[in-house]
Amino acid sequence: MDKFVITGGTPIKGRIFVGGAKNAAVAIIPAVILAGDVCRIENLPDISDVVVISAILEELGAVVKNLGGGVVEIDPRPINNYVADHELVKNMRASYYLLGALLGRFSKARVPLPGGCYFGVRPIDQHLKGFEALGATPKVENGMVSLNAESLTGSHIYLDVVSVGATINIMLAAVKARGLTIIENVAREPHIVDLANFLNSMGADIMGAGTDTIKIRGVEKLGGTTYSVIPDQIEAGSYMVAAAATGGDVIIDNVIPKHLETITAKLVEMGCTVEEMDDAVRVTRDKPLTRCNVKTMPHPGFPTDMQPQIGVLLAMAEGTSILTEGVWDSRFQYVGELCKMGAQVSVDGKAAIFEGVKQLTGAPVKATDLRGGAAVVIAAMAAQGESTIEDIYHIERGYEKIIEKLCSVGAKIERRSFPDR
Ligand code: EPZ
């Protein structure tokens, strides 16, 4: 079993280059199923989630060419199968985008219920509600979701919950449906806008992405395209927090500073300096962290995918801070790991109360999930002494070359093999 071994206590200094956005990439790759020609996608992150979703498309019959350097060419024309029941599909949350994409192309889809990080119940009722409004009959049986439609027709859909996945899935299904689809109370995350831009670059007619209402006028055919994925907001935010946690000075390059505003605001509130440039931010900290409260919300609120990472700073900030999860039922699994490193945190339902400690200390911990994993890496970099982190596969699902990137700015991290217990 491989683990990360991290020796903490070194402020990181230098420049880190952020890759393409995971949550945009895992939507854009399945969206290629809808294209009528070859799509070239650039700036894809080098992470296992992208490898898996590309392999799933190949399994369906697409021709996928990895050209290296984050560029992939996909020819979706040979796909002739609307059933995706390969083992890979079951373990990947984002494979539910196959539902919208296959439905949009074949008016039918059969895909297993999604897996992925566990944050309490993760229903897909809003996805199904949208598909039904477009004319499909959904059925959930034996762990599979089946969708069947004679044809798809535009509709007016109001989402009861602001859901990234439902917004994306309904967009995928509606893009070739007959007539106009209006989706209200949609998610506004940067990757929603990126997917809409990608689909529009293939000839779709989508307006309003980034606002709370999206209008889609169905088109008969989509072509191919060349498209570059946006930078990863959460990877950038994670490195901003790493700079702050270690008292470092780091320029985080290839970012869209506007996407980082809420993270920047919290770091500044806690006593860090954040300088915004055109496509970079510089984060420095040379004084103790001050307490603050944080509540996660759908975009443009503070991102839930940054909740565990900001938790590390709250664990080290003088005084009492409250961190409230406003998106998921339960996303505090990592807290137990931080406590092994000396953090003083109690969880009460959707809130965690942090009593800041002066110094975290190294310990054997595990990555409980992707972002919880990023949090323990950051905590270990700030802690005194050595930490080992197991279950690192969670981290590698979503952070490209994390060791190389962090070591290039002075972190002391190794990936080491340990005998299986
Ligand atoms: C996406 O998950 C992201 N995943 C998650 O990032 C992120 O935490 C989440 O959006 C919120 O920003 C990808 O983009 C692949 P939701 P998703 O549907 O789409 C409830 C990461 O770390 N809900 O926006 O699955 C749901 O239970 C990952 O990169 C319903 O009730 O999230 C939750 O409370 C983890 N019914 C809330 O909505 C539904 O039909 C938001 O979920 C759908 C969702």
Image (cartoon, grey):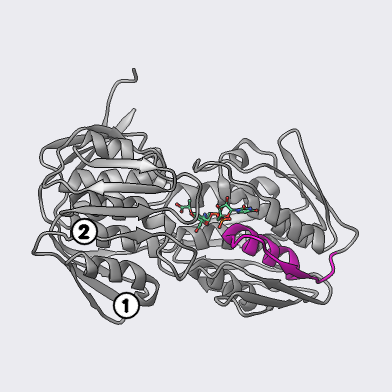
Q: Residue at x 58, y 69 (%)?
A: 195
Q: What kind of residue is marked 2? A: Arg
Quadrant assignment for ligand 1: bottom right
Q: Residue at x 81, y 71 (%)?
A: 154
| Figure check: 228 above or below 406 | below
Q: Residue at x 91, y 59 (%)?
A: 150
**Which residue lies under the disc numbered 2?**
291
| Figure check: 418 above or below 64 | above
Residue 78 makes an appearance in the image: no
Residue 189 makes an appearance in the image: yes
Mark 1 Cα shell of 10 Å, populated few (<14), some (14-19), many (≥20): few
Q: Nearer the viewer, mark 1 or mark 2?
A: 2
Q: Nearer the viewer, residue 275 or 59?
A: 275
Q: What kind of residue is marked 1? A: Asp
**Which residue lies under the disc numbered 1?**
279
Image coordinates of residue 367 in percent, x first then y, are: 35, 38
Q: Which mark is residue 47?
A: none
Q: CA distance from mark 1 to mark 2?
A: 29 Å
Q: Is residue 265 left or right of residue 31?
A: left
Image coordinates of residue 5 in percent, x first then y, are: 21, 36
Q: Quadrant of the N terminus?
A: top left
Tell me, yes or no, whether the highlighted magenta stretch contains residue 100.
no
Q: Earlier in the sequence, mark 1 or mark 2?
A: 1
Secondary structure beneath label 1? loop
Tell me, yes or no, whether the highlighted magenta stretch contains residue 160.
yes
Give the extent of the magenta segment.
152-176
Q: Is residue 13 left or right of residue 268?
A: left
